[in-house]
Amino acid sequence: MKAGCSIVEKPEGGGGYQFPDWAYKTESSPGSRQIQLWHFILELLQKEEFRHVIAWQQGEYGEFVIKDPDEVARLWGRRKCKPQMNYDKLSRALRYYYNKRILHKTKGKRFTYKFNFNKLVMPNYPFINIRPNGVVPQSAPPVPTASSRFHFPPLDSHSPTSDVQPGRFSTSSLAPSGQESLNDASERKAEISELEDSSAEWHRSVDLMTSRNSVTSGGISHQKRKPDIMLPLFTRPGIYPDPHSPFAVSPLPGRGSVLNVPISPALSLTPTLFSYSPSPGLSPFTGSSCFSFNPDEMKHYLHSQACSVLNYHLSPRTFPRYPGLMVPPLQCQMHPEEPAQFPIKLQPPPVGRKNRERVESSEESSVTVTPAMAPTPPRIKVEQQTENQEQPLREKEEQQREERSVPSGTIDEEGAFFARPAAPPAWPLVPLTSPGEESPELNEGSEDRPGKDALAVVEPNAPEKKEDALMPPKLRLKRRWNGDREARELSESSKIHWNLSGSPPLIAGPRGGGHSSRC
DNA sequence: GCCGGAAGTT
DNA sequence: AACTTCCGGC
């Protein structure tokens, strides 16, 4: 503890917005055990009182302007108990985010930076298919927000580290977007490192999916995945008064409601690459930090990100990394209020590796988030990564292996990559035991649950898997749909439905009134 | 203003 | 790890 550190007040209710507890917790930052700069920036950005100091840039997605660099630096210094902090230093810290792809600089605009939200989100929704002709607003990007709360059950309820928590994003699952415009040396440099590390990142993500498809791997291999950033998701309706905030709440009626679409089993069981690895000290998502899924907003958000990226003349490589995303012909001049023109497709109930081929020929049920259920096969066209040749052999091999082992994609004659949204992890994620006792909702206890326990959750279902393998895919799907429904309903009633009532079942965060001193 | 290397700090 | 501090270069 340092003396002389100022106290940073947590905004009191009312107009003030509060970040989730984890954002304030000292353990929010793995390394420093302090708040991270980007947390802080976001924090300032969403507070009305700092609008004159830092604000979202009009019309640009996730872009913000530091209007008063000195003041921001001062605030940051105060928060970090670094009275000597100045903009020069702060900006150095921001520049470190370039390589991490948390931020990038908006060239030519002083004090203007941009969050790589697309990177933060897209890879987490491989199942989202933005169809051609779809359009999305460029401004006021919808993102999972208070009104659009995604809420997936944990994919890794058996995760040894419990590092998959509902409603959190992770950049480790986020392949670097390559959002940087690659026109100067430094960014080419970034590109190189991207080729090196990011594709590894991507593969890690795929690996994760792979492991989720395989009972045996049990996710243990990912135990060591480095903690990364997650997109803070805020759940209080109306807390983003700024329409240009990526967190802005859509004014549209309906958007403000939670999940007004049918929830398919695919939704809750789809491996959305929620490979969230919380920072070591990150507190579990509290009830208020949970998020659910509003497909409209997600869709808008994703497309606008696509537009945003392309408008930036950014590397097309950005997209191939998002196997679920089909970049539509861009028509970015769209209003947030425009009705959805492309449905978000959710994955069908998964098929086991063995049955995959069979099921491919039979009709696959895919679930659209739009009210009607569409029997569209969940093949999602994705640009073929052009840098394949440049990929290190090892990665290529990995890729091949993944293609073989994971029902994640096929390559058609034209070389287009059809990413099949990866099948969910082992079904046993919905435990055969009482859903209540092993609710996917990660509670506090689960945080410390060792991998062994987690595996124990999975194993009892092995017999069923065998059975399944012998079952016609259709039947199997149906059975799973029906069979899991009960369990799912139970768990969803505690995860999604509570959102409606506004009373989360789990409130983990020790949110005492105050927590103010953050030094 | 912005960039990024290098070394130091927590 | 995530900065902080310093600095030379553009």
Image (tube, coloured by chain):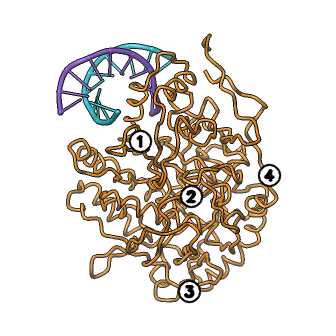
Chain colours: A orange, B cyan, C purple
Kind of residue indicated by mark 3: Pro
Kind of residue indicated by mark 2: Val
Tell me the chain of label 3: A
Q: Secondary structure at mark 2?
A: loop
Q: Distance from label 2 to label 1 (Cα)?
A: 21 Å
Image spot of residue B7 (x, y percent):
31, 16
Tell me which residue sits at (57%, 76%) in the image. Answer: A348
Tell me which residue sits at (64%, 57%) in the image. Answer: A249
- Residue identifier under label 4: A505
Neighbour tally class for label 2: few under 14, some 14-19, many 20 plus, Cα within 10 Å: many
Kind of residue indicated by mark 4: Pro
Tell me which residue sits at (60%, 43%) in the image. Answer: A46
Mark 4 or mark 1: name the one nearer the start of the chain: 1
Q: Distance from label 3 to label 1 (Cα)?
A: 45 Å
- Residue identifier under label 1: A112
CB of mark 3 within 8 Å of CB of mark 2? no
Q: Distance from label 3 to label 4 (Cα)?
A: 34 Å
**Which numbered dot is residue A375?**
3
**Pick the front one: A411 or A124:** A124
